[in-house]
Image (cartoon, rainbow, N blue to C red):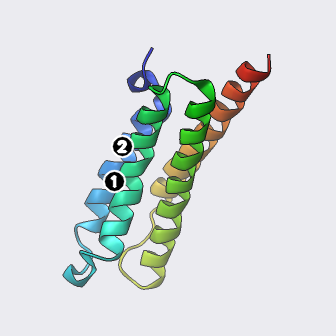
């Protein structure tokens, strides 16, 4: 089994697509600002899941899942900012996807931690 088989990885790839689609209509003045930050944080999510799973150590995997979780929180915060300054409406479907990914990351970290402690 590889990271490509993990549902959280697949959903995080979907999130990247959503973020790219959502930010394409941001003002061009944001190309090097919020647009870039949002896209980089979104891409960081599946990238860290993939890197962590291939490290060969459960502790490393958990560490990279923590980084992925942080990137997801960045995405959420930046979307809230984008909504507050009027660039986009933060759709409920996107909020729900973020919440689902957060829960999946948490459960995966818990399962890996349990594996270490058993």
Q: Is residue 40 visible?
A: yes
Q: Quadrant of residue 105?
A: top right
The residue positioned 26% from the left and 59% from the top of the image is 21
- Residue 110 location (% of width, % of height): 71, 32
Indicate whether 100 appears above or below 60: below
Near mark 2 (Cα within 10 A), the count class, few <14, some 14-19 or many ≥20, is some
Tell me the number on the disc at residue 2.
Answer: none
Q: Label 1 near label 2: C-beta < 8 Å?
A: yes
The residue positioned 60% from the left and 45% from the top of the image is 66
Q: Could you say whether the residue bearing mark 1 is in a helix, strand or loop?
A: helix
Indicate whether 83 appears above or below 49: below
In the image shown, does 98 or 30 lie closer to the viewer? Answer: 30
- Residue 77 location (% of width, % of height): 53, 68
- In-image side of 19 versus 51 (left or right): left
- Residue assigned mark 1: 18
Q: Could you say whether the residue bearing mark 2 is in a helix, strand or loop?
A: helix
In the image shown, does 96 or 34 lie closer to the viewer? Answer: 34
Point out the image quarter for the C terminus: top right
Near mark 1 (Cα within 10 A), the count class, few <14, some 14-19 or many ≥20, is some
The residue positioned 31% from the left and 63% from the top of the image is 22
Tell me the number on the disc at residue 14.
Answer: 2
Q: Is residue 100 visible?
A: no
Indicate whether 108 appears above or below 37: above
Point out the image quarter for the N terminus: top left
Give the CA distance from mark 2 to mark 1: 6 Å
- Residue 87 location (% of width, % of height): 35, 79
The residue positioned 22% from the left and 67% from the top of the image is 24
């Amino acid at each position: 089994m590889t990271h490509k088989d993990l549902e959280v990885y697949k959903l995080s790839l979907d999130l990247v697509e959503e973020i790219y689609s959502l930010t394409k209509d941001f003002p061009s003045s944001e190309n090097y600002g919020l647009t870039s930050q949002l896209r980089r944080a979104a891409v960081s999510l599946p990238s860290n899941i993939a890197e962590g799973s291939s490290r060969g150590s459960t502790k490393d995997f958990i560490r990279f899942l923590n980084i992925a979780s942080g990137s997801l929180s960045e995405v959420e915060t930046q979307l809230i900012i984008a909504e507050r300054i009027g660039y986009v409406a933060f759709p409920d479907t996107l909020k729900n996807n973020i919440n689902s990914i957060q829960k999946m990351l948490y459960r995966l970290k818990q399962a890996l931690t349990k594996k270490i402690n058993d």
